[in-house]
């Protein structure tokens, strides 16, 4: 066990790291180095950029970078880049985009773009004293962060509001500053965290040096300063709508369109009221959201964490989308918080993220929120459409079959035969293996 512990691993060069890994965890398999090296980028300078994104990098881990064309969003056409490993997601996005194309496409609207951060601290004074001191303290905090906010203010952003609050359940001396920001086209994490840390330092300095404070009021300890990934006021809405009869041409399921729409509405209602269904329903939405978030090198963990918290904002976890049928009018809508950036960080460093933004026409963060919400809604529409008509497995199994055939190294002729055969047979790993063995036997 002890021999598997290492100090200074990060200081080893890449080859030495691989050798150590191989000799301690992979029986010294000489193929490991070759395998990892086969995924290095041929452009060494670019590989160095990729290595720099994280620590202890040994290689790259490729994921498919795909495109979903035909997205009409607010009357403008987009080809949406998507990075995702799950089969059927891009196909479903494409199909939903095409479905809504003749029905005016997707509509979107940014509701607000407020980002948040918190300074958590203990203070020995009373709430009344804090309340009385706060207006002056707020001025001081704003003044002492002007070096950090000046540039953002020039772009129209900056610190919007500073609130203070207490939570006695955390501690009798617990205080919090809840700060709201506008961060324009940047996601704003560094901007927000720097300001909050400066707030902490300024408050500490104030408590230690200000005139007229008693002994208790000199006690101020910063616990932590960090942005909040919960941004319930950085929200975008996307919707599709039409008269039900107008869906007739695009639906093509053979189903009565009204019956389809009402069944669809019930499926969304189930997810609104039942958390077990809501999680899967929202997962489908995030299939579309995360894929574009990743393609533009935004932070999908933050987006997911925030989206799920938002889904539970009234105390019960619910669907992020809603469906209404009013007379003959069908409307399907998604409301989701998306805190995104388009100007700094990985979005500007990762060559494929740069390309994604180029494909999307160099969107502002505001526009990107809208372009990402649409595939989220499209995914949800595609999944529900399958679920309430053919079932999800028919489409999934087609893609699954393709992956299994690739796994077995099937030839194009074998693939064609297999696709025809499995139209009427259940796909499984064993069934495909047996099919190929039989195929080879008779050839
Ligand atoms: C699979 O990745 C996503 C779905 O389960 C979503 C849903 O059930 O709505 C198909």
Image: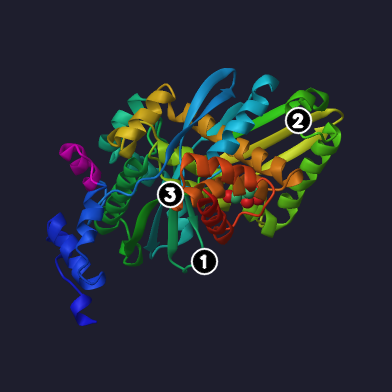
Q: Secondary structure at mark 3?
A: loop
Image coloring type: rainbow
Q: Earlier in the sequence, mark 1 or mark 3?
A: 1
Q: Magenta region: which residues? A: 40-52
Which residue does the numbered mark 1 point to in the structure image?
A: 168
Q: Using residue 413 as the reference point, say whether residue 321 is left or right of it.
A: right
In x, y percent, where is residue 388? 76, 45
Q: Is mark 3 within 8 Å of ligand 1?
A: no
Which residue does the numbered mark 3 point to in the structure image?
A: 409
In x, y percent, where is residue 100? 66, 26
Alpha carbon of mark 2 to alpha carbon of mark 3: how far?
35 Å
Against 222, residue 293 (above or below) is: above
Residue extending furthest toward the front: 442
Using a 10 Å C-alpha cutoff, classify the residue at mark 2 as few (fewer than 14 neighbours), some (14 to 19) or many (20 or more): few
Residue extending furthest toward the bottom: 1
In x, y percent, where is residue 420? 63, 42
Q: Earlier in the sequence, mark 2 or mark 3?
A: 2
Label 1 close to label 2 by CB (< 8 Å): no
Q: Secondary structure at mark 1?
A: loop
Alpha carbon of mark 1 to alpha carbon of mark 3: how far?
63 Å
Alpha carbon of mark 1 to alpha carbon of mark 2: how far?
59 Å
Q: Using residue 200 as the reference point, say whether residue 408 is left or right of it.
A: right
Q: Residue 252: give its label.
A: 2
Q: Residue 365: give its label.
A: none
């Amino acid at each position: 066990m002890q021999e598997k512990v290492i100090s200074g691993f990060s200081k080893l060069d890449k080859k030495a790291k691989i050798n150590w890994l191989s000799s301690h965890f992979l029986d010294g398999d000489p193929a490991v180095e070759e395998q990892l090296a086969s995924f290095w980028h041929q452009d060494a300078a670019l590989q160095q950029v990729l290595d720099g994104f994280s620590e202890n990098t040994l290689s790259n881990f490729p994921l498919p970078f795909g495109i979903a064309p035909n997205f009409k969003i607010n009357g403008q056409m987009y080809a949406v880049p998507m990075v995702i490993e799950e089969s059927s997601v891009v196909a479903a996005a494409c199909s939903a985009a095409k479905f809504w194309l003749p029905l005016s496409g997707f509509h979107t609207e940014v509701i607000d773009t407020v980002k948040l951060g918190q300074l958590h601290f203990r203070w020995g004074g009373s709430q009344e004293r804090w309340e009385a001191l706060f207006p002056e303290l707020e001025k001081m905090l704003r003044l002492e962060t002007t070096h950090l906010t000046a540039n953002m203010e020039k772009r129209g952003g900056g610190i919007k509001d500073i609130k203070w609050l207490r939570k006695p359940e955390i501690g009798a001396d617990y205080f919090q500053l809840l700060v709201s920001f506008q961060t324009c086209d940047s996601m704003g994490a560094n901007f927000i965290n720097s300001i909050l840390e400066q707030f902490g330092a300024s408050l500490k300095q104030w408590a230690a040096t200000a005139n007229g404070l008693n002994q208790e009021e000199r006690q101020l300890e910063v616990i932590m300063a960090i942005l909040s990934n919960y941004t319930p006021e950085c929200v975008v809405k996307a919707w599709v709508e039409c008269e039900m009869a107008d869906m007739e041409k695009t639906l093509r399921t053979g189903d009565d369109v009204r019956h389809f729409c009402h069944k669809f509405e019930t499926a969304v209602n189930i997810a609104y009221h039942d958390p077990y269904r809501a999680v899967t329903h929202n997962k489908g939405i995030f299939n579309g959201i995360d894929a574009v978030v990743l393609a533009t090198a935004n932070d999908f963990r933050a987006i997911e964490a925030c989206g799920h918290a938002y889904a539970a904002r009234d105390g019960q976890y619910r669907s992020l989308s809603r469906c209404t049928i009013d007379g003959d009018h069908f409307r399907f809508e998604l409301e989701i918080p998306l805190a995104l950036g388009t100007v700094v960080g990985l979005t500007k460093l990762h060559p494929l993220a740069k390309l994604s933004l180029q494909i999307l026409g160099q969107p502002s963060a505001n526009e990107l929120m809208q372009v990402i919400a649409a595939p989220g809604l499209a995914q949800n529409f595609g999944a529900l459409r399958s679920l309430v008509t053919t079932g999800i497995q028919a489409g999934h199994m087609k893609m699954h079959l393709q992956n299994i055939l690739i796994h077995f190294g099937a030839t194009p002729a074998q693939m064609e035969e297999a696709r025809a055969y499995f139209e009427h047979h259940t796909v499984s790993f064993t069934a495909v293996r047996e099919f190929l063995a039989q195929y080879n036997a008779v050839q």
